[in-house]
Image (spheres, helix red, strand yellow):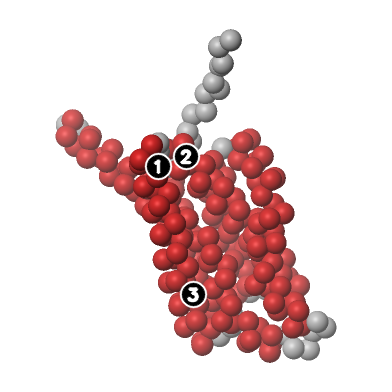
Amino acid sequence: MSKSAATDAVLARSRLRMLTILFASSVAFLGSTIAPGLPGLYAHYADVANAELLSRLVLTMPALFVALAGPFVGLVIDRYGRRNTLIFSTVGFGVAGMSGLVLESLTAILVGRAFLGVFLVGILISVTALIGDYYSGDERNKVAGLQGAFISFGTLIYTILGGFLAEIHWRAGFVLFAVSFVLIVPMLLSLYEPSRTPVIERS
């Protein structure tokens, strides 16, 4: 491979890395896309005790477990690495998110949503850590700005799609979580585990 071709390959991988990080960030608010389907969910489980309250919890459960799991996920990232945590969390996020397609009981759906929150915080923390590791200075600020834009744009697009899918069936919105699986291949190809050499302070 010529020097020019090698340089092009490095640049292409660098662009893929950035896009992968940005699209991974865009799933941050994917959990709320099932909101349009909540009336249908409530109607389906109307005979269950406290169905109205439990139906609302389906939407808010991930946020609760994001808050509860955050400190522990940080420990996992320190132990197993940012890249591994991100890939594992992305797979788990997709599985937990799509579980609503097949789970029959409202309680089981709530459990799936709780796991969704745990995997979501794994994605958010590891992506943010990787941005800090991969980039510095103005480039880091640029990527952080793009991350915010992708999160906002992703929330808009996923919410619109969730509304269309809710018209088909209240479970159809859970299909959107399949987006997570699309990200696995570019993660494996473009991301690497940053070296974390301890800094030795001189007295």
Q: What residue occupies the far right of the structure in this picture?
A: 49
Residue 28 in picture, x, y percent from top left: 53, 60
- Mark 1 touches mark 2? (CB < 8 Å): yes
Q: Dot 2: within a 10 Å radius of its alpha carbon, few (fewer than 14), some, or many (20 or more) residues?
A: some
Residue 104 in picture, x, y percent from top left: 70, 77
- Mark 3 touches mark 1? (CB < 8 Å): no
Residue at the (60%, 40%) spot, across then down: 77
- Mark 2 touches mark 3? (CB < 8 Å): no
Task: Report the label total.
Answer: 3
Classify mark 3: helix, strand or loop.
Answer: helix
Identify which residue, 1 or 118, lies in the foreground: 118
* Spatial CA span between label 3 and label 1: 28 Å
Identify which residue, 126 or 102, lies in the foreground: 126
Marker disc for residue 115: none
Which residue is under mark 3? Answer: 159
Q: Nearer the viewer, mark 3 or mark 1?
A: 1
Identify which residue, 189 or 196, lies in the foreground: 196
Does 51 appear above or below 23? below
Which residue is under mark 2? Answer: 132
Which residue is under mark 1? Answer: 140
